[in-house]
């Protein structure tokens, strides 16, 4: 008897054998480690449960190897306030007044334009105990800058402006514009001595033509606050300037205190 086996059937059979034999070796490949490398370049958050740390694309442990952070101690009801400022929209003095009232330290991540145009505000930030962080000189997509010297130049230009205005060296905290990054960027910032600061709480406050209402902003920020939160707010937001006093009071009533990035470990 002659048994005829179709070529396609033979191909499927041998492919199955190969996959079965390879399974023990495939299980040893560190999939999570390799997939979390430079492929992730846009910081994002997913809030699944009120009062809890959001889900992120990369882990805290992964970031920590590059001196990068998105959250503090998750066992403590502490908040790290940060403000991003590409320009002054008239609200920073009021924000500083509220921070002073609550004795709340904050970090202002500035770009070159802000320091050029608002040196007195920068000096006030420093005089009142706040941190001025490096948000780059021209706010480019840093994940597209592959040359380490070009990367360094963006940070150095901003820190030089800061030194000229304050007479002090800038503290080495860096926030990537738009949250865009690559592993090479994290390594480059680390080599320059910087801690890269992302965030674990933010909301849609940046569009001046579409500001959130007081009620929706307070609801979102109070529901999503969580222990160790690094909060990102934009100081250009009118809503933020109007709600900040009430917001900080609500967070204090929930048992939270405010910490400086210097205390972040």
Image (cartoon, grey):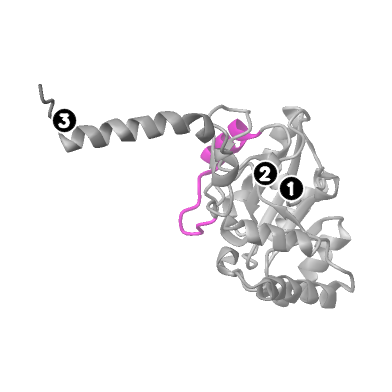
Tell me residue 98's x, y (percent). Answer: 75, 49
Tell me residue 263's x, y (percent). Answer: 85, 45
Quadrant, the N terminus? top left
Tell me residue 155's x, y (percent). Answer: 72, 70
Question: Residue placed at 19% from the left, 37% from the top?
Answer: 8
Q: Would you say residue 178 sits in the magenta stretch?
A: no
User: On the picture, is 46 further left or further right than 235?
Assistant: left
Q: Residue 118, located in which quarter of the rendered image?
A: bottom right
Q: Nearer the viewer, mark 1 or mark 3?
A: 3
Residue 250 shows in the view: yes
Local packing at callout 3 (Cα closer than 10 Å; few below 14, some 14-19, many 20+) is few
Q: In this view, does 142 lie above or below 253?
A: below
Q: Which of 22 and 97 is in front in this view?
A: 22
Question: Residue placed at 46% from the left, 59% from the top?
Answer: 209
Q: Residue 113, located in which quarter of the rendered image?
A: bottom right
The residue wearing badge 1 is: 65
Callouts 2 and 1 close, C-beta under 8 Å = yes
Q: Identify the magenta region.
A: 206-225
- Secondary element under disc 1, as helix, strand or loop, is loop
């Amino acid at each position: 008897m002659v048994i005829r086996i179709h070529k396609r059937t033979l191909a499927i059979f041998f492919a199955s054998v190969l996959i079965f034999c390879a399974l023990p070796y495939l299980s040893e490949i560190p999939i999570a480690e390799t997939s979390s490398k430079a492929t992730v370049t846009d910081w994002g958050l997913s809030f699944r449960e009120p009062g809890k740390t959001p889900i992120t694309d990369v882990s805290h442990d992964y970031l920590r190897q590059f001196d990068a952070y998105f959250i503090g101690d998750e066992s403590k009801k502490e908040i790290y306030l940060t403000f991003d400022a590409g320009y002054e929209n008239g609200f920073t003095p009021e924000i500083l007044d509220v921070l002073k009232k609550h004795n709340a330290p904050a970090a202002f991540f500035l770009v070159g334009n802000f320091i050029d145009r608002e040196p007195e505000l920068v000096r006030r930030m420093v005089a009142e105990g706040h941190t001025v962080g490096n948000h780059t000189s021209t706010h480019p997509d840093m994940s597209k800058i592959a040359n380490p010297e070009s990367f360094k130049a963006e940070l150095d230009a901003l820190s030089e402006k800061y030194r000229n205005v304050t007479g002090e060296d800038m503290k080495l905290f860096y926030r990537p514009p738009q949250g865009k990054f690559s592993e090479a960027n994290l390594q480059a910032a680390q080599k320059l001595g910087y801690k890269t600061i992302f965030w674990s709480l933010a909301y849609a406050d940046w569009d001046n033509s579409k500001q959130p209402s007081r009620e929706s902003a307070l609801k979102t920020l109070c529901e999503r606050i969580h222990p160790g939160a690094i909060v990102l707010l934009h100081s250009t937001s009118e809503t933020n300037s109007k709600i900040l006093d009430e917001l900080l009071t609500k967070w204090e009533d929930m048992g939270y205190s405010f910490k400086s990035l210097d205390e972040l470990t």
